[in-house]
C-alpha cells in the first residue's frame, strides 16, 4: 500500500504474531532485490484491550520507529474492511491511535498530543525547541517536535534550491539528536497552506511523511504562522492537518491506496 507515494509492505499477522530481524527488513525493503518500500508494518494481535492490533513499524534500514502517519492510514483502511468497522484503534510502541473514515473516503487519524520539550524530542542538550540555535547549509533556527518520532523543521522562503539529501543526512546524524531525526523544510504559502519537503530518518528522501506533516504544522502553529487547520502540500500529494485547541490533539486526514498482495519466502 502507499500513502501519497510513501510506500509500505504490510503483513497481516492478526492470527499469528510475527517479528522481523533487521536483516529481513532490509532485504524486503530493497528495491532491486526485494519487494521495495520505505517502511514495513506488521499487523499483530493487540496488546491493549482498547486496540484492534499492535503494529511494529520498521524503516528501510531495519530500525524500528514509534510512529508513521501514512502507514497508520493504510493499515486503518485495511482493518476497516477486514474487521468491518468504521473506527479502528492501532497500537504502536508509542501510543494507541484512533482512526476513522472521512466523508470523502480519506482516513482520519488522531495523532495525539505532540511533544515539544528538549528531553522529549530527544536532544542531547537543553535548547529552546521553538527557536533552536542550530544550522545547516545556511538554513537556521529550526523548530523541533516529537510526533511519535523526532522531527527537525526548517521554515524557509525558497524550497527549490535545497540540497535535501546533503542537508537531511547531515541533520539526521548530528550529535544533537541521539535517536537521529526526520528533517523537514517548509514554506508557509498562507495561513492555511504549507509546502513541505522531507528527509526521513533511516529511509532518505520520500514523497510524503505523515508524522512530518503533523510536525511541520505544529512548528508553524507554534510560531503563529498558521491557523488551527492547514493543507500540507507534499511531493506525493496533500494532507489535511488540524489541532483541537482545547485538547491539543493533532488530526491528520489523507488517502490510503492499495497496490497489490502476494507471498514472500522469509
Image (cartoon, rainbow, N blue to C red):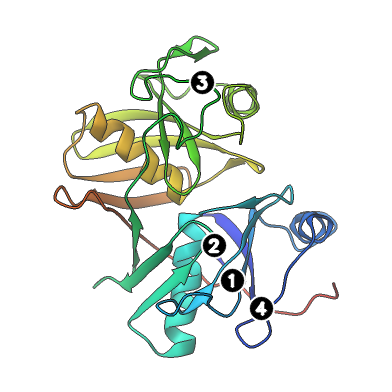
Residue at left 66%, top 42%? 202
**Is label 3 or label 1 in front?**
3
Measured in 3D between alpha carbons, the distance from the residue under mark 3 to the one under mark 1, in whole angstroms, is 43 Å
Earlier sequence position, callout 3 versus callout 1 = 3
Q: Which residue is mark 3?
A: 125
- Residues 104 and 71: in front is 71
Proximity of marks 2 and 1: CB atoms separated by less than 8 Å: yes
Marks 3 and 2, the one that precedes in the sequence:
2
Q: Residues within 10 Å of mark 3 (few under 14, many from 20)?
A: few
Asked if disc 3 and disc 1 are in contact, CB closer than 8 Å, the reply is no
The answer to which of marks 4 and 2 sits earlier in the sequence is 2
Give me the C-alpha separation between circle 2 and circle 1: 7 Å
Q: Which residue is mark 1?
A: 259
Q: Which mark is residue 261?
A: 4
Q: State the image coordinates of residue 116 (x, y, percent, origin top left).
A: 36, 35
Is the C terminus in the top left, top right, bottom left or bottom right quadrant?
A: bottom right
Determine the secondary structure under disc 2: strand
Residue 4 appears in the figure: no
Say whether marks 3 and 2 touch (CB < 8 Å). Answer: no
Distance Cα–Cα, label 1 vs label 4: 7 Å
What element does badge 4 sit on?
Answer: loop
Residue at the far top in the pictured view: 138
Q: In percent of the image, x 26 and y 39: which residue is there?
A: 193
Q: Secondary structure at mark 3?
A: loop
> Does 264 sit above or below residue 218?
below
Q: Nearer the viewer, residue 148 or 265?
A: 148
* Residue designated by label 2: 2
Residue 185, above or below 13: above
What is the tally of numbered marks visible in this picture?
4
In the image, which disc is placed on residue 202? Answer: none
Nearer-N-terminus badge (3/4): 3
For the point 49% across and 56% down, which residue is it? Answer: 94
Amino acid at each position: 500500500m502507499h500513502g501519497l507515494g510513501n510506500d509500505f509492505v504490510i503483513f497481516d499477522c492478526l492470527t499469528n504474531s510475527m517479528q522481523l530481524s533487521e536483516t529481513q527488513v532490509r532485504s524486503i525493503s530493497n528495491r532491486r532485490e526485494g519487494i521495495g518500500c520505505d517502511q514495513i508494518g506488521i499487523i499483530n494481535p493487540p496488546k491493549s484491550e482498547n486496540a484492534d492490533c499492535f503494529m511494529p513499524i520498521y524503516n528501510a534500514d531495519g530500525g524500528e520507529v514509534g510512529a508513521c502517519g501514512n502507514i497508520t492510514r493504510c493499515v486503518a483502511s485495511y482493518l476497516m474492511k477486514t474487521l468491518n468497522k468504521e473506527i479502528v484503534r492501532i497500537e504502536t510502541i508509542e501510543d494507541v491511535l484512533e482512526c476513522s473514515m472521512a466523508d470523502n473516503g480519506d482516513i482520519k487519524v488522531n495523532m495525539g498530543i505532540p511533544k515539544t520539550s528538549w528531553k522529549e524530542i530527544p536532544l542531547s542538550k537543553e535548547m529552546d525547541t521553538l527557536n533552536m540555535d542550530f544550522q545547516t547549509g545556511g538554513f537556521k533556527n529550526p523548530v523541533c517536535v516529537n510526533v511519535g518520532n523526532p522531527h527537525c523543521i526548517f521554515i524557509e522562503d525558497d524550497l527549490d534550491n535545497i540540497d535535501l539529501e546533503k542537508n537531511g543526512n547531515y541533520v539526521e546524524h548530528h550529535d544533537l539528536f541521539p535517536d537521529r531525526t526526520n528533517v523537514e523544510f517548509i514554506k508557509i504559502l498562507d495561513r492555511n497552506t504549507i509546502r513541505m519537503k522531507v528527509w526521513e530518518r533511516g529511509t532518505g528522501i520520500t514523497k510524503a511523511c505523515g508524522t512530518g506533516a503533523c510536525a511541520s504544522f505544529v512548528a508553524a502553529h507554534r510560531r503563529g504562522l498558521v491557523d488551527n487547520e492547514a493543507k500540507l502540500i507534499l511531493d506525493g500529494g496533500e494532507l489535511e492537518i488540524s489541532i483541537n485547541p482545547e485538547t491539543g490533539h493533532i488530526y491528520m486526514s489523507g488517502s490510503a491506496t492499495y497496490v497489490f498482495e502476494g507471498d514472500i519466502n522469509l
